[in-house]
Amino acid sequence: MSEGETRAALDEHALPATVRLSDLESPLNLAERDERLALLDSLLEEYIFHTRIIRERWRVNEGLIILLGMFAMILGSWDLGIGELAGGGDYNRVGIFGDESGFLHIADLSLIFALLSIIAWVGIFALLWIRSPLMRENLVYMTLATFGITLGHLSSHANAISFPFDATANDWAGVGIGNLVLLFLSIIVVHKAVIETRDIHVQERHAHPDPRVVQKAWRDHSLKVWSLSLGAWMILINIAAWAGAHAVAPRPPLTNDMTLFVTLHVLSGIAAIAVWTHVLWYPQFMLGASADRIQSIRAREVAGEIVPQASKRRQGKCPICDVDTAAVKHADGIIEVPCGAEGCDGRGMPGAACPDCEALLPTRIGCLSCGSNTTVASHFTRAEAW
């Protein structure tokens, strides 16, 4: 892919969205009934946002990826009346290469379908590579994770054809190792890289003296639903790999109909490809042309880049005598002060209504040490020496 094509893909994804996540409100308003349900409101808002953006942005390319996924799964897994898989094949012939390989001794139509399935998988990888230039490295990691989990389930079914039923501890080794590879590459590598790149993006591109603007930027760049999609992809490829291995594990002559397992393998595989497309597409859409690659902070440090330090919670200090005061500035830039009303323990932003008693929160704080009365903002800035 040329530099011009890559830039075009970045610019296309960098177009402004018609709606921002921070502009949406949950239609259920569960938090009004119980504050502990605020997380569900937040997730519902994100799901609505993702649905709207997908309907707005997904076009022929994303549809083609899913369509190729359907062809790849069906042509590579279904007998389609040929009888090759239903009969169990010749288990005395194994391998892919060589005149005596099992792959070259299957029925001609089955061989054609298998080759077409391989071509479809190559097309899926190529389209994802082109459509998500920022996520190319993570695309490779997720592809390796898919191979790992597939080989793990095949290994576990080798000696326990009804796995996990009647399986010994040794039979679980394949699935266990495969899932360890999956967890490492998906969570430690891909998830960590996307989350930390998002953090750097917000700190650098959305810095603002008004903490409310910064808080809105963090909300717009929330990745809760994206993280759930990554988890759903991990579950789906496990289901697809187990069902596929389960369908081909019995030795001939076959006495049980495996159609149910093949169907489960195909449907879960197609769903996994659709979710995979979303997992790779969304960080590309969110960051657009504002990032050159998606990497973890550790990878950037190894490359010699200067990584901005995340802000921490700060206690306010009197600008006169430098003694700690009751004001607090959180990591997201929000300043919080205690309510001045008698008997009220509420806290909130200066000048806003107290969440407990609805009185206006103070914009100035008196120091108990020196008796000075100064603005809240001055408790987080140092006076310059003349």
Image (cartoon, grey):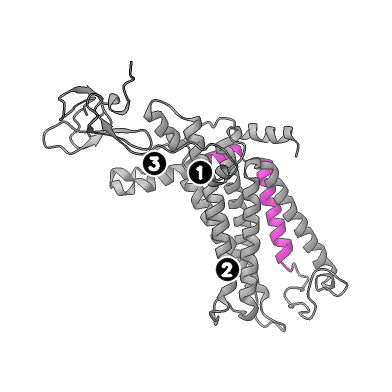
Residue at position x 56%, y 50% from top? 190
Q: Where is residue 344 in the image (x, y as percent from the top left)?
A: 15, 37
Quarter occupied by the N terminus: top right
Secondary structure, mark 3, is: loop
Compared to residue 128, the image places residue 18 above or below, namely above
Q: Is residue 301 left or right of residue 209?
A: right
Where disc 1 sits, the SS reads: helix
What is the x, y in percent for residue 86?
Answer: 72, 75
What whole-number distance in Å separates the C-alpha atoms at marks 2 and 3? Answer: 43 Å
Question: Which residue lies at the image location 80% right of the left edge and 69% below the top edge?
Answer: 96
Q: Mark 3 points at which residue?
A: 27
In the picture of the structure, the residue carrying the numbered disc 1 is 196
- Pointer 2 with pointer 1, Cβ within 8 A: no
Crowd rating for badge 2 (residues with CA inside 10 Å; few <14, some 14–19, many 20+) = some
Residue at left offset 41%, top offset 29%: 213
Q: Residue most toward the left?
A: 342
Between discs 2 and 1, the one toward the N terminus: 2
* Discs 2, 3 touching: Cβ within 8 Å: no
Q: What residue sits right under mark 2 in the picture?
A: 177
Closer to the eye: label 1 or 3: 1
Amino acid type, mark 2: Ile
From the viewer's perspective, is 86 left or right of 350? right
As shown in the figure, which amino acid type bears the numbered disc 3?
Pro
The residues bearing labels 2 and 1 have C-alpha atoms spaced at a distance of 27 Å
Quadrant containing the C terminus is top left
Task: Name the residue rendered at 58%, 32% in the picture.
Answer: 290
Residue 71 x, y percent position in the rendering: 72, 57
Q: Is residue 309 on the magenta stretch? A: no
Q: Disc 1 and disc 3: Cα gap in Å?
A: 31 Å
State the extent of the magenta-drawn residues as a range: 51-79
